[in-house]
Amino acid sequence: MELCTGSGSPEEEEEEEEEEEEAPWSRFSRWLECVCVVTFDLELGQALELVYPQDVKLTEKERSSICYLSFPDSYSGCLGDTQFSFRLRQSVGRRGGGREEEVYNRDAPPTLKTEVSHFFGFVYFRQVKDASVKRGYFQKSLVLLSRLPFPPLFQTLLQIVAPEFFEKLEPCLETVCNEIDQWPAPVPGLSLTLPLMGLVLQVRVPSRSDKPGGSPVRQSAAENLLRTPTVLPSIHELDLFRCFQSVLVHLQVLWELLLLGNRWLSWHRLPPSPRKTVLALISMISPLRFCCDFRPYFTIHDSEFREYTTRTQAPPCVVLGVTNPFFIKTFQNWPHVLRLGETKMAGDLPKQVKVKKLSKLKALDTKPGIYTAFKSFLHKDKVLIKRLLKGIQRKRPSEVQSAILRRHLLELTQSFIIPLERYMASLMPLQRSVSPWKTPPQIRPFSQEDFLLSLDDTGPQLTSVLKGDWLGLYRKFFRSPNFDGWYRQRHREMTQKLESLHLEVLCDAGLVTWTKDKSEVETVDLILKLREKLNKARRQQLQLKDGVLDKLENFIETIVTSLSEELRRVLSTH
């Protein structure tokens, strides 16, 4: 059912819809905030050369951060083309994406909702020798800024657009932006065709109703022969195996650390590596949303650098991806550091890094490893490790290895979350307790001890073979930002379900009959409360049976016409 968006007349709503349709770059903004070009200026350093569309407003702080984050921290190892991404905090007061974004977030999986307070930046950096430039090098970055967490999609876009842009510059950018402005909206659950520079990309936007771990988009035989459209199997999933092949024996430690929302520093030599590792780390606990801050690429010029390095207060829970060895010294008190270099082989297997003491960290000569004092609550899954290592020996494709790894992590997270979901559902009032003559009943409070007692019969041991201290893991999880974020989201969804049920029973309650022996004051009070509930239902895009809102609207109109002219006039202004 399609819900209305305002309480004005049909004519006013139609005008608003026409204005919305005619708003410049409205379709473009569903996918991207803007496209930026960052270049190196001899006098200014990194400078923002171009922002498109030109009417996009970026604050000085945002512009400065984009400039610094769009170039590698060290250019020496980045000759040629380099792709990476960053995450940038939005300035206070910036407006969100409006109603369409609310509808998208309602239907999207928790891990793929739009960013409320951050932008993702996807970068294509080119550095080549150029005798015509005073420094001897051409250095420029093309940057896509978006609220959508779709790294594979936007990195593919850059691979198509950037080479052409570096040849033709601004005219090429204008053409591409106009094409994106014709794209359909990213609606969860739909497969979309996206035309771009003579190609057609076929993508599917995941939905919260999808079966977890479902099959990716596949290309038909006819499409393979015609080579059009180009099918992206996933717009959000990463190659987990390539990211984690040197830490396979420590996957359990990594998963628990991410689940518990610990502070992490991920250190690599070149920008693409930390970006991939950080995004892979936070995806380990999917479908649970990672509720801490994370920065796939972080530099000393980042606007939050001082906030994260202060000694006067505990730094926030955040996962940082860095390339500068300076951070090892600066963050030497951080509890967990992941240092990965190029994967080395031990025979026909990737050499596995070791878990090491934090005291072994050295700024300039730190060997690959996981530097932490953390002791995992659960035992390793030796069967999984053996299966993945055997897959390497048999030269199993990386995408198949990643699918095995993703399935394991999904099942592990589900085994942990299902008991919480089951207990949370038990706190929901019974449907028969929802009365039209009373305010909706309250959700019962979450009791950690009652939940832990329920694990004997409904715990993760029913779905997971892993042994260990599950109770200890849950107790630690209760103190984490991830539990707080999960609980708030589930409580909000359950509250909205109660509101929906209350509206539906009101719809069938015979309210017209109820008002016949009531005073005008009581009737007006009912009308005002119903209007408030209807407006709230529209704002929150509540899921309701067909016709509920229309029926209640008709009821309000019927009752208003029975009131005195003076009261009708008063109600028409409210």
Image (cartoon, helix red, strand yellow):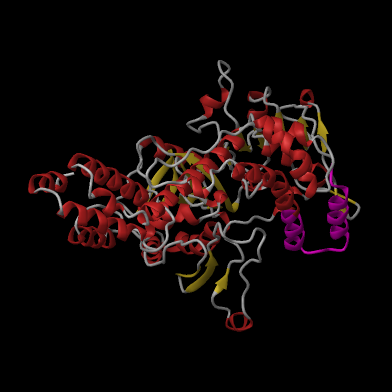
The residue located at (45%, 42%) in the rendering is 66
Q: Is residue 309 visible?
A: yes
Q: Which residue is outermost to the front? A: 517
Q: Quadrant of residue 76?
A: top right
Quarter containing the N terminus: bottom left
Identify the residue at image location x=70%, y=27%: 335
Q: Quadrant of the C terminus?
A: top left
Residue at left 55%, top 31%? 300
In this view, 136 is above or below 311: below
Question: Can residue 339 be seen by looking at this rendering?
Answer: no
From what the image shows, is residue 565 above or below residue 217?
above
Q: Quadrant of residue 315?
A: top right
Left or right placement of residue 256 versus residue 527 in this view:
right
* Residue 449 coordinates in the image, percent (x, y): 69, 30
- Confirm whether the magenta stretch covers residue 392: yes
- What secondary structure is the stretch in magenta mostly built from? helix
In magenta, the rendered stretch is 380-407
The location of residue 477, given as percent across then percent down, is 67, 33
- Foreground residue among 325 and 115: 115
